[in-house]
Image (cartoon, helix red, strand yellow):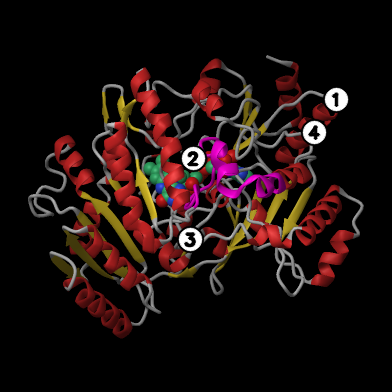
């Protein structure tokens, strides 16, 4: 075992491992790239995280870089939860609820707590965090905040950033800071501090002041944008300042989150769900436009297409056997209302039903939980599609999660159809959050074959060009990771890209914090890191909890 491992084992309370098996296991997340860590630790507490960061900083001062990669459950499909240095795996020990105010619904947790488990606890008090990802049963809160996740309810509730009140963050040098919205007066106190924290506030405030106009150009006409760093929401017009906006979605590249205080919302299990089937894409778009422009938004507006249903019919013929008509409809929309007032909910659902009846080939409104579960099962077949493998041919998470303005979703769908035909990829199975203009597309490819690898990289290039041509963001619902790093400059242009790199430099002068994520990965690097034997295997470690 290396000297570094010996040192860390002596000084950390949590376990430190370097075995070949552990390194192999943690060399992958849910993405198509792999990178074995030199060491793995299971931090016991914040002090372990601080010691590891301080140690890495001291080595970096002497010219030796040991990258630090925080990791939750490793369900990141962008290659953000892997790294070549020390991987800090939080769910092992740092997985507790520290405080829960059942009245206000404010909850303080350690980063490794499972999102589904936290929501279960909150639901016993009539509350939950509604911006959960589809991977809620597997993922951690720390990972979800570091990705700024959005999910099926995000059309109404936004991203998880809306629910973050306060963070404790371990900085690159091991210092701990607390972030929350500061008044102008409190900001001035921070600016006067002689610590690394003070340096950060001074450098960042200066950068924001000097680059007002440039930062304004980062705004995109989409509802979700996690590309780069969120420089827009740090400083308000009133001079108040919140560093949390930067850490949310930063994937461990600016600091390591050691504690989170989150808000929650009222949970209403009694919802109205409508399923509408379509044979025409323009009608789908008209329905999305109408439903997402109303004052009272639905709590879900999801889409799936016949490519998905037909693929699942072949893989598991009984799964949705009689739940949908044959031939399978070209598109299906799922529209949910969760308003606590029964009357309002009924009114909205009936209005939506009338809108859909003018555009769809069939419309079904369900208010009973069992009937609703049957309809949701149709949307959720995507999980069988992505879990299935046909030899080495797998549903590869290549181009999931970009966002376009919702009113341009039909153009994205048509455009990606053209790409699949040109590149000769079949089938085009897609699903996603229509109300946020976000699609999930995982083409069936065999990454061990040269031909399919070439197709994969052509698709990456062409897809992001398409998304950007529609005014979209390469990273809508989740962050950039390694997979989208090569496209970040293309999205924002050279000047903004240089500004984002300056922000990274302020927090991480030695480049020890999750290097290669967001910056420093080229398409050639991706080719080198590609997993020819990509599997979705890890997910079975995190089987849904009861
Ligand atoms: C089937 C499937 C469905 C998914 N559905 C969605 C979805 O609907 N919406 C969505 O947004 N995402 C989705 N994802 C992506 C992913 O599951 C989520 O982003 C998830 O919340 C990540 O949580 P995790 O615990 O697995 O984090 P990890 O994968 O372990 O880490 C994610 C990133 O956060 C960083 N990180 C982890 N912990 C910390 C910490 N304490 N401090 C700082 N940085 C940290 C990591 O370095 C990494 O860059 C899906 C993934 C899969 C496989």
Category of crowding for the residue at label 1, using alpha-carbon neighbours closer than 10 angstroms: few (below 14), some (14–19), many (at least 20): few
* Residue 24 covered by magenta stretch: no
Q: Earlier in the sequence, mark 4 or mark 1?
A: 4
Q: Is residue 486 left or right of residue 414?
A: right
Q: Which residue is mark 3?
A: 222
Image quarter (top left, top right, bottom left or bottom right) of the N terminus: top right
Residue under the image location 31 percent in, 22 percent down: 392
Percent x, y of residue 121: 46, 59
Using the image, tell me which numbered label, if any, was put on residue 57.
4
Image coordinates of residue 89 in percent, x first then y, are: 58, 36
Mark 2 Cβ and ligand 1 under 8 Å apart: yes
Distance in Å between CA atoms under marks 4 and 2:
26 Å
In this rendering, is residue 196 above or below 459? below
Relative to residue 476, is residue 122 depicted above or below? below
Tell which tag, 2 or 3, sits nearer the viewer.
Answer: 3
> How would you rate the neighbour count of disc 2 (Cα within 10 Å): few for under 14, some for 14-19, many for 20 or more?
many
Boundaries of the magenta span: 473-500
Residue at the spot of label 2 = 76
In three-dimensional space, the C-alpha distance between marks 4 and 1, rounded to whole angstroms, equals 9 Å
Left or right? Give the position of 482 relative to 431.
right
Q: Position of residue 461 (x, y in %)?
A: 45, 36
Q: Is residue 75 left or right of residue 277?
A: right
Q: CA distance from mark 1 to mark 3?
A: 44 Å
- Which residue is found at the position 49% from the left and 24% from the top? 527
The yes-or-no answer for disc 3 within 8 Å of ligand 1 is no
Q: Residue at x 83, y 30 (%)?
A: 58
Give the SS element for disc 1: loop
What SS does tag 3 mark?
Answer: loop
Q: Judging from the image, what secondary structure is the residue with disc 2 in? A: loop
């Amino acid at each position: 075992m290396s000297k570094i491992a010996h040192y860390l084992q002596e000084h950390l309370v949590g376990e430190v491992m370097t075995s070949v098996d552990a390194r192999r296991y943690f060399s992958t997340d849910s993405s198509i790239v792999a990178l074995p860590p030199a060491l793995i630790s299971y931090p016991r507490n914040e002090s372990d995280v601080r010691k590891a960061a301080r140690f890495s900083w001291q080595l970096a001062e002497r010219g030796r870089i040991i990258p630090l990669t925080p990791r939750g459950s490793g369900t990141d499909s962008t290659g953000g939860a892997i790294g070549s240095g020390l991987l800090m795996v939080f769910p092992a020990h740092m997985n507790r609820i520290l405080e829960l105010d059942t009245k206000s619904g404010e909850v303080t947790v350690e980063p490794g707590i499972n999102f589904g488990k936290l929501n279960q606890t909150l639901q016993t008090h009539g509350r939950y965090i509604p911006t959960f990802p589809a991977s809620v049963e597997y993922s951690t809160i720390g990972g979800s905040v570091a990705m700024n996740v959005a999910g099926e309810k995000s059309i109404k509730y936004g991203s998880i950033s809306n629910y973050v009140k306060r963070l404790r963050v371990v900085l690159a040098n091991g210092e701990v800071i607390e972030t929350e919205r500061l008044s102008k007066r409190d900001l001035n106190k921070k600016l006067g501090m002689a610590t690394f924290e003070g340096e950060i506030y001074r450098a960042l405030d200066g950068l924001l002041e000097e680059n007002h106009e440039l930062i304004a150009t980062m705004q995109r006409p989409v509802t979700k944008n996690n590309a780069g760093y969120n420089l827009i929401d740090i400083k308000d017009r009133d001079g108040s300042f919140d560093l949390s906006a930067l850490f949310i979605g930063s994937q461990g590249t600016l600091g390591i989150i050691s504690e989170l205080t989150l808000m929650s919302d009222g949970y209403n299990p009694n919802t109205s769900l409508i399923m509408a089937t379509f044979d025409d894409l323009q009608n789908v778009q008209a329905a999305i436009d109408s439903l997402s422009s109303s004052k009272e938004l639905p709590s879900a507006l999801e889409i799936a297409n016949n490519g998905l249903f037909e693929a699942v019919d072949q893989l598991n013929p009984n799964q949705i056997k009689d739940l949908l008509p044959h031939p399978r409809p070209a598109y299906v929309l799922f529209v949910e209302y969760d308003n606590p007032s029964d009357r309002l909910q009924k009114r909205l659902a009936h209005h939506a039903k009338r809108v859909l009846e003018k555009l769809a080939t069939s419309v079904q409104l369900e208010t009973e939980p069992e009937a609703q579960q049957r309809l949701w099962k149709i949307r959720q077949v995507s999980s069988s599609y992505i879990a299935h493998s046909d030899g080495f041919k797998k549903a590869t998470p290549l181009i999931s999660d970009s966002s376009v303005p919702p009113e341009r979703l039909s153009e994205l769908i048509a455009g990606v159809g053209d790409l699949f035909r040109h590149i000769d990829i079949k089938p085009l199975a897609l699903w996603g959050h229509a109300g946020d203009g976000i699609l999930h597309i995982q083409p069936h490819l065999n990454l061990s074959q040269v031909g399919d690898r070439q197709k994969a990289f052509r698709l990456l290039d062409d897809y992001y060009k398409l998304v950007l041509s529609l005014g979209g963001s390469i990273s809508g619902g989740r962050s950039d990771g390694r997979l989208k790093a090569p496209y970040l400059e293309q999205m924002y242009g050279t000047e903004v890209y240089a500004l984002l790199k300056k922000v990274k430099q302020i927090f991480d002068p030695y480049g020890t914090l999750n290097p290669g994520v967001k910056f420093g990965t080229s398409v050639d690097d991706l080719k080198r890191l590609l997993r020819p034997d990509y599997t979705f295997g890890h997910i079975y470690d995190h089987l849904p909890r009861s």
